[in-house]
Amino acid sequence: QQPVQSPQAVILREGEDAVINCSSSKALYSVHWYRQKHGEAPVFLMILLKGGEQKGHDKISASFNEKKQQSSLYLTASQLSYSGTYFCGTARSGAGSYQLTFGKGTKLSVIP
Amino acid sequence: EAGVAQSPRYKIIEKRQSVAFWCNPISGHATLYWYQQILGQGPKLLIQFQNNGVVDDSQLPKDRFSAERLKGVDSTLKIQPAKLEDSAVYLCASSLAVVSRDRVVYEQYFGPGTRLTVT
C-alpha cells in the first residue's frame, strides 16, 4: 500500500518553513525520509521508528505518530540547498524481507 | 567510503532490444535492491537480494526482466525484450542492518541510477 504524501508541491522563499506529511492506511514499523535532486540519486535523511519519535538533522526534523500511521518532515529556515523532491518510504515489518514502499514525492522549491 | 556504483548512467535502445545494468553495492552490505523510478513517481521495488539469494521478486515482470547477484556482491538487471513503458531510471540500493531503540532497521543507500530510454 503506497503512502500518501502531501502537499504534492510547495514553493518557499529562503528562510520560510515547510511541513511535508506522509500517511499510510496500514500499520507501520518505520518511516524513512529521502531527498532527491533532479537527475541524482535519493539521499537518505533519517529513519523514524517509534510512536512519537522525533529526530532532527540541522534544520530538518521529523516526527512519527505510530498510532495514526503518519509522519511529518519539518524544514525550518529553508535554504536554497533544500530544493528537491522529498520521498517518504514506509516499512510495515522489521522481520523477514524489510522493504520500503515509497510515496509519490513532494517537490520543494526554495527561491531567493 | 565508496557509495553504490552503477553503470551505465544512460542508455538508449529501441523497443524489443535487450539491455543490462550493473550494480556494485557498498562494501559489506548484504542486502541489495533494484528499483524502477518512472518520471514523477517514487522508486518502486523490483527485486531484493540477501547475499546471493532472492528475498522478494514479486514485482519483477519475469517475462522480460531478470536479475542475478553472483557471489553475493555485484548484481545485474536485464530486460529482454524492452518495451516503451520500460523507460525509467533504474536505481540500485544496498543496505546494512542497524539496531536502534531495540529495533532492527535497514538504512538504504542508493546509487546514481541508469536512465533508460526505449524508443
Image: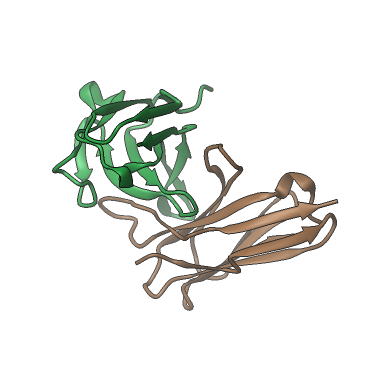
Chain colours: A brown, B green
Residue sitting at the far bottom: A68
- Residue nearest the viewer, comparing A32 with A21: A21
Identify the residue at image location x=84%, y=54%: A14
**B26 displayed left or right of B79:** right
Q: Quadrant of residue B78?
A: top left
Specify the farthest residue to the left.
B63
* Percent x, y of residue B100: 48, 51
Q: Is residue A79 left or right of residue B38?
A: right
Question: Which residue is more in the foreground, B112 or A30?
Answer: B112
- In the image, A112 versus B16, the foreground residue is B16
Residue A50 point in image, percent of width and height: 49, 65
Residue drawn at (56%, 38%), measured in percent from left and top? A39
Quadrant where the N terminus of chain A sits is: bottom left
Q: Check the image and report above or below for A38 versus A13.
A: above
Relative to A63, say whether A25 is above or below: below
Q: How many marks?
A: 0
> Residue A83, can we see it?
yes
- For the residue pair A6 and B29, the one nearer the viewer reads as A6
- Measuring 40% from the left and 27% from the top, which residue is drawn there? B11
- Position of A102 compared to B56: left or right? right
Quarter of the view holding residue B76? top left
